[in-house]
Amino acid sequence: MIIAIDVDETVVDSRIPIHTEEEAIAYFNQTDLYDNFEPIKDAVESVKKIKESGNVVVFISRCFENHKKSKLNFLLRYFEFDGFLDASKFTHKYIFGYDFLIDDNQKELNHVPPEKRILFKNWDDTLKILKEKGVNC
């Protein structure tokens, strides 16, 4: 199966307090944005379990051009995976071919067929849901 996984707030905690649009733009335009982030609890082990069970793991995320390399390097540093898709040029992530999309953003998942969506809350629940849907992991 092809498992697409959103990056921010599913495998990395990239939240910071941003109060203005200017702060947000400055924050997301940092070229080293992901260099000092750590994976979310249980993310590394869970993604490894999904991958080692014979599934294809693809990360899908929206990137500012300036931090795309930093985000990809973060993923390469911590995870084994089969692909990385930058969805920044697309309105929604549903257009990519995958069996399931794991995402923390309900608005994003509203555009995904119900049988393919998994709302991320934590990795224990996510692995449980994948198993219920017939995914080896």
Image (spheres, rainbow, N blue to C red):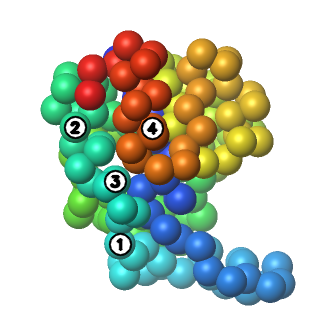
Q: Give the class, few, some or many, for how many residues have Cα within 10 Å of label 1's Cα (few <14, many ≥20).
A: some
Residue that appears at 22% across and 43% down: 48
- The amino acid type found where label 1 is placed reads Glu
Label 4 – label 2 distance at C-alpha: 12 Å
**Horizontal and vertical percent position of residue 35:** 36, 78
What numbered label is drawn on residue 49? Answer: 2
State yes or no: discs 2 and 1 in contact (Cβ < 8 Å).
no
Image quadrant assignment for residue 56 = top left
Label 2 – label 3 distance at C-alpha: 10 Å
Image quadrant assignment for residue 127 = top left
Instruction: Please tell me whether residue 12 is drawn above or below residue 32 in the rendered image.
Output: above
**Horizontal and vertical percent position of residue 70:** 40, 69
Q: Secondary structure at mark 2?
A: helix
Image quadrant assignment for residue 26 = bottom right
Q: Is residue 85 visible?
A: no
State yes or no: discs 4 and 1 in contact (Cβ < 8 Å).
no
Instruction: Give the residue at mark 1.
Output: 38
Instruction: Give the residue at mark 4.
Output: 126
- The amino acid type found where label 3 is placed reads Ala
**Horizontal and vertical percent position of residue 30:** 54, 81
Q: Nearer the viewer, mark 4 or mark 1?
A: 4
Q: What quarter of the picture does the C terminus occupy?
A: top left
Q: Give the class, few, some or many, for how many residues have Cα within 10 Å of label 2's Cα (few <14, many ≥20).
A: some
Instruction: Give the residue at mark 3.
Output: 43
